[in-house]
Image: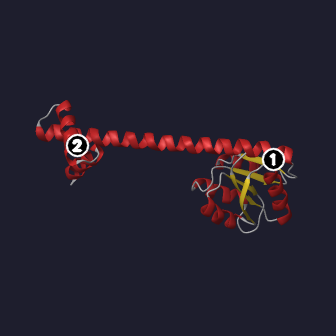
Amino acid sequence: MSGKIIIVDDEPITRMDIRGMLEAEHYEVVGEAADGIEAIHMCKQHVPDLVIMDIRMPMLDGLKASKKILDEKLAKAIILLSAYSDKENIEKAKNYGVSGYLVKPITEKALAPMVEVAIANGNKTRELEGTLAALSQKLADRKLIEKAKGIVMKEQQFSEEEAYQFLRELSMNKRCPIVDIAEMFVITDEE
């Protein structure tokens, strides 16, 4: 099993127990923190696959820290720990995109499968986010090219095919992507 993990709990003995369980399963614990502020700082340094974090801590609690870590993509997944299984915290955890929720005391039997699934889902989510970003960029580029093509058609009295060929040839002659050429036509048209 592999994955970089940060453990966050204000109780040093709890961090030590969790570290022992994780290292027995061959996970790499890259850091430990005692509160949410330290957790965020460590996540910025290490960008771990997983953060295992207690909810109730001084300074900044685990829920608020989780929201920031996930919103800023500082870790792929988070498992929250709590001595309580209250519905309000569970709902917040779900809304923030937390991958798991374990009620203390933590056992190796409960922790190991939760960690494996959370890391796998975190990797899959990151991969899907990358695919979505690439597709969104392609769509934005396509819209820009279509807009530029419309401008060329209007200015040069070209057909749609002629306008596209004009942009394509200009792109090849100038040795730059067609989307860059399209952007120049759109920018100059908007001035």
Q: What amino acid is labelled 1 in the image?
A: Leu
Residue 166, numbered circle:
none
In the rendered image, residue 132, in percent from the top left (x then y), is placed at 49, 41
Q: Quadrant of residue 155?
A: top left
Residue density around tag 2, few if under 14, some if 14–19, many if 20 or more, within 10 Å: few
Seen in the image, is 88 located left or right of residue 144?
Answer: right
Q: Residue 86: tell me if it is visible.
A: no
Q: Position of residue 99 (x, y in %)?
A: 69, 46
State the image coordinates of residue 13 (x, y, percent, origin top left). 86, 63
Nearest the viewer among 127 and 65 is 127
Who is closer to the viewer here, 130 or 105?
Answer: 130
Please indicate whether residue 57 sits to the left or right of residue 67 in the image.
Answer: right
Secondary structure beneath dot 2 equals helix
Dot 1: few (<14), some (14–19), or many (≥20) neighbours within 10 Å? some
- Mark in the foreground, 1 or 2: 2
Give the tally of numbered discs: 2
The residue beneath circle 1 is 111
Quadrant of residue 116 in the image? top right
Q: Which residue is mark 2?
A: 172
Q: Earlier in the sequence, mark 1 or mark 2?
A: 1
Q: Residue at x 83, y 66 (%)?
A: 12
Question: Quarter holding the C terminus?
Answer: bottom left
In the rendered structure, which amino acid carries the disc numbered 2?
Met
- Residue at 82% x, 56% y: name it: 18
Q: Is residue 158 above or below residue 42?
A: above
Q: Determine the secondary structure under disc 1.
A: helix
Instruction: Work out whether residue 126 can be spotted.
Output: yes
Where does residue 190 sit, x and y in percent of width and height? 22, 51
Render colour scheme: secondary structure
Quarter of the image where the N terminus is located: top right
* Mark 1 → mark 2, Cα distance in angstroms: 56 Å
Name the residue located 50 percent from the left edge and 40 percent from the top edge. Answer: 131
